[in-house]
Amino acid sequence: MHVPTICGHAAIISSQVIILAFGYGFLGAVLYYEILSPPDRVVDLWIHHPEQLTMVVTLIATVFSVINSILFAFSIKQALRHWMSQPISLVYLSAGVALSKGSFIWKPKHWLLTILTLFVFGVLRLLTAGWTTLLTPTYLLRPIQMQGTELDITGTAFSTLLLEEYQKQGFADIQGNSFEILDIGGMLSGVSAAGYIYGLPGTFNFNGAKYNISTQGIVPTIEDYSGSDGVPDANHVRLGFSGGNVTVDMGPILGKHTSMPISQGYSRNYSMLQQGLTANVSCRAINSSQTQYVWNTTNSSIIYTNPAPVNDSINGLRLWNVTANCGANMPMAQQYVTLVDASGNASVSGSGFLPSVVCPGPTDMNQTYTSFTILSQGFYKYNFLNATVCEVIPLLTTVRADYTNELISSEVISSTPFGPENVQILSFIAGVAKFQSIGSQGLKSSAIGDTLYSIYSSTTNTSITDNLGSQAQVYSELEAYWRGVVEFSATFLRSGFMAVGSFPDNTIPDYLSSPVNGTMYISTIGWTSQSLTYLLAILPITIITIFTSVCALYSIWQAWEEDSGYKTRFDASNTLHLIMASAAGSPTLQNFNKEGIIANDNEKVKLVVSDQDDEVKRLVKVDQMTPV
């Protein structure tokens, strides 16, 4: 028994097993945590210096691979030396030498040895690839479940609160900055929604948040997308909202691995299910037979004339008193002032007049109070719009809001019509529509009319006046416009009541809260248990460790039985050692022809060590052995 030799082989086994254990430990951590990400500092370095860090990982993988290969080669050499102390055929000797050098033999007559050496050769070549695959992080999306709350505007509790605000402030108190937001914000939302349906870019900004197309009636529930961080004063919250920080109550759901911190990653996207509000809008021409609307635009009078205008001063002003029947003989009137010349006439090509009257409920009293109507008509350059009625049916929705690249995009998942408990919200939305219809008309033009004209002109090759017989596109634009206004009104309402300072401690009461759920997707680098590649990557390392251990155990077993003569040095993979041993033993072999080489493969040889001098070694044929 040679104790140092046994200890050396045990060290080889231990080293190989430790390296393998590292690989399996790392793989086990990935499987246990499902997703394993490096620290944020490493992620940042990887994003900014991917080539350099990839090289570092490859170098580490190469070092592990080289250590595996060296330990394997050494164990093969030692096992082969022990084996040569017994009779061994030359083909087995050549196979062992090839393995110790990381090569293979090609002997069709000995196909098992050929396959074995080819297999080990391939596995050795895969070591670096296996370690590289195992250690190199990949780009991935880490999903984190999120939950929180937002303002619930669908129930009786909010309607009661809204009614209290009406009584406390009065709807007429929405003025100043808040009125401008309602007016301009509603117009921009309508323009964005109307243009998008015909391929125009549709991005709408409100309170620092950026929406794709329209707001869909939502308010941001993610802090990074909530927009303005200003703190509004007590007079500019709720119905007086004029911009400012909106309270966000959202956080991750901690999973089973609470000890693992949630990395920042290099970007974050969110997909949330939350409340929204939209509307089904249907616009159609008022036929001459539909006398129930009693649409009258003929009542107007000149209220100012200037016979001798100077420079660009006003020549004259006309007051319009536009009326309509909003059901049950309930007339509604809206007044407008437009610019005219000294004779009381407007410029047909340069002036535009598009009046609207908003009926706060359905014109058919058999319907429930869950919708409202808007009557409109265009004059002068807007004469492409005939007398029109638009029925607006608001809908409470559940939307999937995607927060990506600083943009909020929403998709309606489900919707329900308004109920009797939503009368106050309906009144508010109709009021916003009325603000918009009044504010959009100026002395010479209408923002609504210009929107319809511009979108039509930029998306078709025909003149809008050619469309008088079929106003399908104009009606479609108008429907989208009012839908955008309705959706904005809901976003304004939510923002005002969720603004900082709206509730004590900026906490929405439970009875006014609605749950919000979704997923945060962290773009980062790391390792995921969903990839089977890691299991394949560890296989070459496992196979080489098994081969190394088997060879080392064989050497330990042989060293246990051999005497001290085992201390002599001989390396079968060393060509010089084989030449020296062959020259000393002078084995008689056949010639280098095909038959001779085949015959020599089966010849058995043995490494004989002199009893008197262990430095003397001979490689002899078994049938030619004589005592040394």
Image: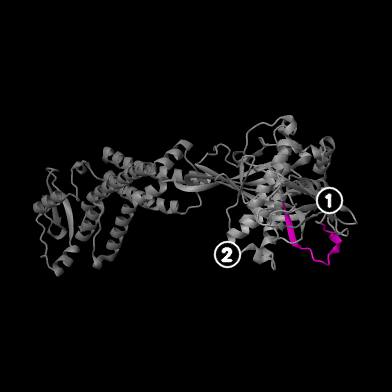
Q: Quadrant of residue 174?
A: top right
Q: Which residues are magenta?
A: 275-296
Q: Amino acid at mark 2?
A: Asn
Residue tagged by mark 2?
461
Residue in the image at 29% along x and 59% along y: 118
Question: Where residue 14 appears, x then y in whole percent?
Answer: 36, 41
Residue in the image at 29% along x and 56% along y: 121
Q: Quadrant of residue 197?
A: bottom right
Marks 2 and 1 in Cβ contact (< 8 Å): no
Q: 202 or 99: which is nearer to us?
A: 202
Observer able to see residue 269: yes
Image position of 305 (left or right of 58):
right
Question: Where residue 525 appears, x then y in whole percent?
Answer: 47, 44
For the residue carrying disc 2, how many other residues have a C-alpha within 10 Å: few (<14), some (14-19), or many (20+)? few
Residue tagged by mark 1?
333
Answer whether residue 282 is magenta in the image. yes
Secondary structure, mark 2, is loop
Which badge, 2 or 1, is on the more N-terminal residue?
1
Question: Where residue 371 appears, x then y in whole percent?
Answer: 80, 54
Q: Amino acid at mark 1?
A: Ala
Residue farthest front in this picture: 308
Circle count = 2
